[in-house]
Amino acid sequence: MHTADAAIDDTVARANVRRLAAAQALTGANAAVVFATGSIVGAQLAPSISLATLPLSIYTLGLAAGTLPTGMIAQAYGRRAAFIAGTGSGALCGLIAAIAILYGSFVLFCFATFLGGVYGAVSQSYRFAATDSASIAYRPKAISWVMAGGVFAGFLGPQLVQWTMDLWPPYLFAVSFLVQAVVALIAMAVLAGVNAPKPVAAQMTGGRPLTEIIRKPRFIAAVICGAVSYTCMNFLMTSAPLAMKFCGLSLSDSNFGIQWHIVAMFGPSFFTGSLISRFGAARVAVIGLLLEAAAAIIGLSGITAMHFWVGLFVVGVGWNFSFVGASALIVATHGPQEGKKVQAFNDFIVFGLVAIGSFSSGQLLASHGWSMVNIVVFPAVALALAGLAVAAFTQRRAAV
């Protein structure tokens, strides 16, 4: 690609990044409402306390279920159509969750969080959409800057909960979810302006078969890294609010921990792209995985509010490094014609595994306590590190 072409492409990409980053902030706020309240509402509505985190597990199931349809819609009708469908699901999530709280329906609340997960699945494509019109050099930064929008979600989402949770007594969090629906509609308006034309016929065909791409060690390592990164973070974040409640800490303590966790998840994105450009995606991902292990160590060292807060903050930073690194590795495994199918398949595997892990978090917390939730992080991190090491070794041998 000529320098002039790269400049033109990056002009379009930078404009898209601004809108996608804003949408990331708004979508992340929706997710923050779900995660700050889901296990608490679940404990109020569920027939058994062991099912308290089921709504959050259903959310991750929605994440997994929404990935492949997102890719199909984007491939057939363009990214914008997928964005509109996703934000519509987000608005329905908020409306149905509020109704579920009013009527005390656990099943309906789980359905609402499933729709929230579908919205979250579409939002995962924002980081890849930012690379569609970007030069190769700008792609890691485009991914990183879009995810940086989540910093604002870290403030907006928990604050929405804090401001609205008691506005409709005795229906705790009902107004929070109604506000969430409005925020999703605002995100829809923002995403409507993204420059993402419908694919032409030449872009919908060609490229290598998916089966050929997914057999490559680099792709396998990137998927494992992304899955472990997200699963471990989700495991700790899903369980933490309920664990804090079990430890006698307040809702305000929980909201504060989730708020700074989300800030830590997305704040490093202002420089993660530059770190990847300088040191490589794999090295940054390794640092992130080690930080997630460090967060588990913090979780095992005590159950004060400060232990929860610091642990959630550290696992957030670790997730950012490892997940952005894994995403950059995925982008490097495919060509332009292969992008949407490879990205959708990656997210399907990642969030499918996240969903499986999430379903066990509530039972693990109820049966074995907060310590065991932290302990399971270590073998998962070891697996991801081994995968990256094998991929690096294979790549060096191929280069000889």
Image (spheres, grey):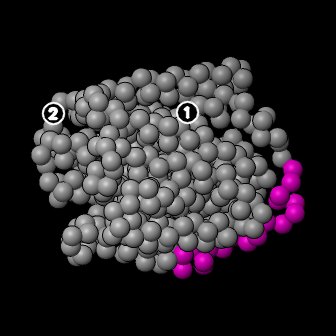
Residue type indicated by callout 2: Gly
Q: Which residue is mark 2?
A: 302
Q: Is 231 situated left or right of 257 in this image?
A: right
Q: Position of residue 284 (x, y in %)?
A: 46, 38
Q: Is residue 23 above or below residue 263?
A: below
Picture quarter with the C terminus = top right
Q: Position of residue 364 (x, y in %)?
A: 34, 32
Q: Is residue 319 above or below residue 122?
A: above
Q: Is 118 situated left or right of 155 in this image?
A: right
1 and 2 marks in contact (CB < 8 Å): no
Q: Position of residue 286 (x, y in %)?
A: 45, 32
Pick whichever, 94 or 335, lies toward us.
Answer: 94
Q: Is residue 253 visible?
A: yes
Q: Is 244 situated left or right of 148 in this image?
A: left
Q: Residue at x 59, y 21 (%)?
A: 390
Disc 1 from disc 2: Cα separation: 30 Å
Label 1 Cα neighbours within 10 Å, binned few <14 / some 14-19 / many ≥20 = many
Q: Which residue is mark 1?
A: 224
Q: Position of residue 148 (x, y in %)?
A: 43, 60
**Residue 198 highlighted magenta (yes or no):** yes
Label 2 Cα neighbours within 10 Å, binned few <14 / some 14-19 / many ≥20 = few
Q: Is residue 281 visible?
A: no
* Upstream in sequence: badge 1 or badge 2: 1
Q: Is 210 situated left or right of 279 in this image?
A: right
Q: Residue at x 44, y 56 (%)?
A: 107
Q: Residue at x 29, y 35 (%)?
A: 365
Q: Is residue 101 above or below residue 230?
A: below
Determine which quarter of the picture holds residue 152: bottom left
Secondary structure state at the residue bearing disc 2:
loop
Residue type indicated by callout 1: Ile
> Range of the magenta residues?
188-206
